[in-house]
Amino acid sequence: MAEPIKQYLNSIERELMDGKATEHTHRPALKTLLESISPKIRATNEPKRIECGSPDFVIQRLPDKFTLGYLEAKDVDVSLDEVERSEQLKRYLRSLPNFILTDYLEFRWYIEGKPRSSGRLARPGKGGKLIPDKHGEESVAAILHEFLAHQPVDITSPEALARRMASQTHMIRDIIVNAFENDKASTGLKDLRKAFAEVLIPDLEKTENTAQFADMYSQTIAYGLFAARCNHEGPEKFQRLGAASEIPKTNPFLRKLFDIITGADLEGEPYAGFVDDLVQTLAFTDMESILEHFGRRTKQEDPVVHFYETFLAAYDPRLRESRGVYYTPEPVVSYIVRSVDHLLKTRFGFKDGLADQSMMSMARDDEEVGKIEEHWPRVLILDPACGTGTFLYAVVDHIRNQFIESGNAGMWSGFVRTHLLPRLFGFELLMAPYAVAHFKLGMQLAAQDLDDSLRKKWAYDFSGNERLQVFLTNTIEEVEQKAGLLYGPLRVIADEAEAASKAKTQLPIMVIMGNPPYSGHSANASWRMNAEGKKTPTFIGRLMQDYYFVDGKPLGEKNPKWLQDDYVKFLRWAQWRIEKTGAGILAFITNHGYLDNPTFRGMRQNLMKTFDNIYLIDLHGNAKKKEKCPDGSKDENVFDIQQGVAIAIMVKDRKGART
């Protein structure tokens, strides 16, 4: 490399001596130097992407355009020590596994965010004259060769995959935020954000919610690619174009949305390179090993959830806290599911419990055709905060085990099509668990969680327009529907919102179960400023007012803030939904604070007025109370949290039920 480096230094020196050089002036010379190392190297410098927060250069290997690494170039007189302390570089080092920082003369190489080696070609002298460093050419040449020869290690564990996906998703998210903040966002990004705000999540267009949209968008890309990779078969290399067709049919929303955001139009986006990096990461992943952890080969305790939690912990642990995302232990889920099954049999007369096949007629009004009848299964089941689908998975497992024990394999596919898929509903706000829920339930119904001897008999093949009725929506948010304003590809967002809205407000949901989020600082507002600047209650805010009164009189609490915890709002919403149906079962595991805290007097009274029977199991585990078990041992929590928890199963009988 002696001659290319000599020519490079001569170019830098001429530009410095000219006295008009900036950090941009030297980029062509640096590009020439990097590409001189091998004819298979391309160093790309794209101003549009740089303006939105990408590193100055992406280094790729031809002809497959495999990304080898990234390089950030600062001006010759800029202190690299100060740059290392900047937020920009910290972000790069968190996300970029193979990275060089340079001032055109010194080169600092980092692997997985840690310094690997550094070297200096020269130092600037008077009048722009360069003073070469002894052995500088050899050290920098070695760094550049090793930098370009660096290869990713094949990923064989969910933990390694989650960390790498999280870092790349960070970059996509940060670039999108930067693009909006600097008014560089594309028309496509702006339209998509507006569509989400109008039909799924109000207030998403507000400036302060840019990060929320960027989170949703980047997770859509990451988990869409993940789902596509898991379904990729054949000898062809996994790639971005066409990946949408490999997303499970169980999720038409994600499938169509993914086609919009990762198709040919992506090429002009500033984050496109990092999407391709995600594709490369997944292409180099030993997916067979990953899927073994997921339970394709062995049946484990909800393994997909563990992968999601690993991803979320690496991606943004604060998001987990703000949205109350916690894994529900399998014994808790199993107990709740079996209890609901028992109550359906004993209290409501459904001899098959959760597997009930009876139908009901439900009248609805239609202005054009008059009153018509819709036929629905009687036992509709909803998890309003379904996360990765743990409770719905347990329901399917419970029902399928009954079929397996009876040996009715021939009836299973017909039952799934007619009596299972139409009865299971789930709502989820976060894109990553939403995608995982579809993926996990789809694998379950395809019998991927069963032994090879059972798989062929019990595999269900999705066809036509069938889908899992797990919807991307904020359960407790009443969205003003503007679906008629969306046309073309964005119509898929409106379709998702309309289907979720029907399940929220029209269908006779009879069973509501799950683990709603626990968050004292609720992310779901009870009040909002209207167009006139007046503070008005949201939909859930209006419902929550019932918990602020006892015997018709105000609580009189100085600071009833704990009533604003998310789990309380979800309990109130589920109570309202069961009342709307007229009868049913509410089964939640939540924070146990409402059982005896004086602030919840109105809540307890209101629940007792609605439900005929309330069964409570206090699982304790409150670290602040420092309770002991009856045998004197430590009081352990079933979750990795400080507040204690309790299971509540509430039953409202048929009396006065609407059909």
Image (spheres, rainbow, N blue to C red):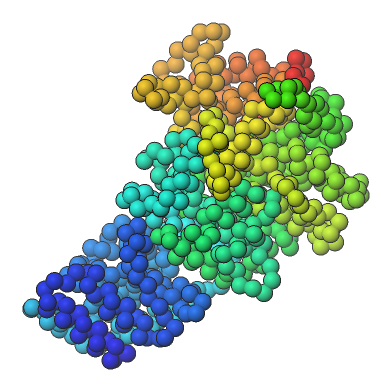
Q: Residue at x 43, y 47 (%)?
A: 190
* Residue in view at x 67 percent, y 58 percent: 294
Q: Is residue 310 left or right of residue 514?
A: left
Which residue is at the front of the view, 141 or 431? 431
Residue 557 seen by the camera: yes
| Residue sticking out furthest to the bottom | 3
**In the shown orientation, is residue 175 left or right of residue 539?**
left
Residue 375 position by quadrant? top right
Q: Quadrant of the C terminus?
A: top right
Foreground of the two, 159 or 413: 413
Where residue 418 appears, x then y in whole percent?
82, 41
Residue at 72 percent across and 20 percent down: it is: 582
Hey, which residue is sitting farthest top in the picture?
Answer: 552
Q: Is residue 90 visible?
A: no
Residue 416 position, x and y percent, is 81, 45
The answer to whether residue 139 is left or right of residue 454 is: left
Picture layout, residue 335 above or below residue 89: above
Relative vertical location of residue 158 with respect to residue 67 in this rendering, above or below: above
Could you say where residue 104 lies in the image, as x and y percent from the top left?
Answer: 25, 75
